[in-house]
Each structure stands twice: as C-alpha cells, then as structure tokens.
Amino acid sequence: MTLAFLLDEQARGRRLLAVLDAFISHGLISAKEDLAIWPGFPFSPVPDAPKEER
C-alpha cells in the first residue's frame, strides 16, 4: 500500500480514515496529540500554527 493509494482523490480520504481507524483500534494511536487533523485534511496543507505573543 502506498501513500498515493491512501491519498487518492477519488477515495476522498476514506482509505486514509480506514487505516487510521485500524491504527486506533490496535492501540497504535491513542491520544489526541498523536494525530493532528485539520479542516480539509488530507487534501489541504497544514494551516500555520498561531504565533505566540511575547
């Protein structure tokens, strides 16, 4: 299985979500911090993190 297969536009993220669901059910991903998802994932770039004020 390749990343191109998982992220294929025709699947619209369903394949990736299935793999992530398998990781969660087998305990490979357990905490919210282990997996960062943003609106538009996986087809949009990671939004810029808010800059901390000093």
Image (spheres, grey):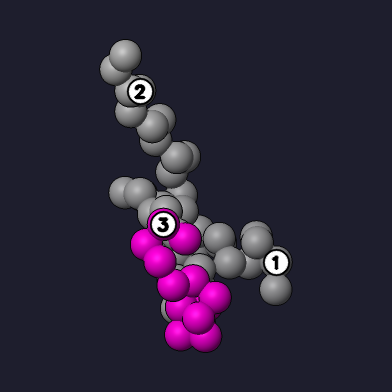
Label 1 with label 2: CB-CB less than 8 Å? no
Between the residue at mark 3 and the residue at mark 2, the CA separation in whole angstroms equals 19 Å
| Outermost residue to the bottom | 26
Write the residue at 55% across / 60% down. Answer: 7
Looking at the image, residue 35 sits to the left or right of residue 28; the answer is left
Between the residue at mark 1 and the residue at mark 2, the CA separation in whole angstroms equals 34 Å
Residue type indicated by callout 1:
Thr
Residue 24 circle label: none
Observer-nearest of 47 and 4: 47
Question: Above or below — where is 49 with respect to 42?
Answer: above
Q: Which numbered mark, 1 or 2, is in the foreground of this view?
A: 2
Q: Position of residue 36 (x, y in %)?
A: 42, 53
The residue carrying mark 3 is 33
Between the residue at mark 3 and the residue at mark 1, the CA separation in whole angstroms equals 24 Å
Residue 51 circle label: 2
Question: Magenta stretch containing residue 7, yes or no?
Answer: no
Which label's residue is closer to the chain start, 3 or 1?
Answer: 1
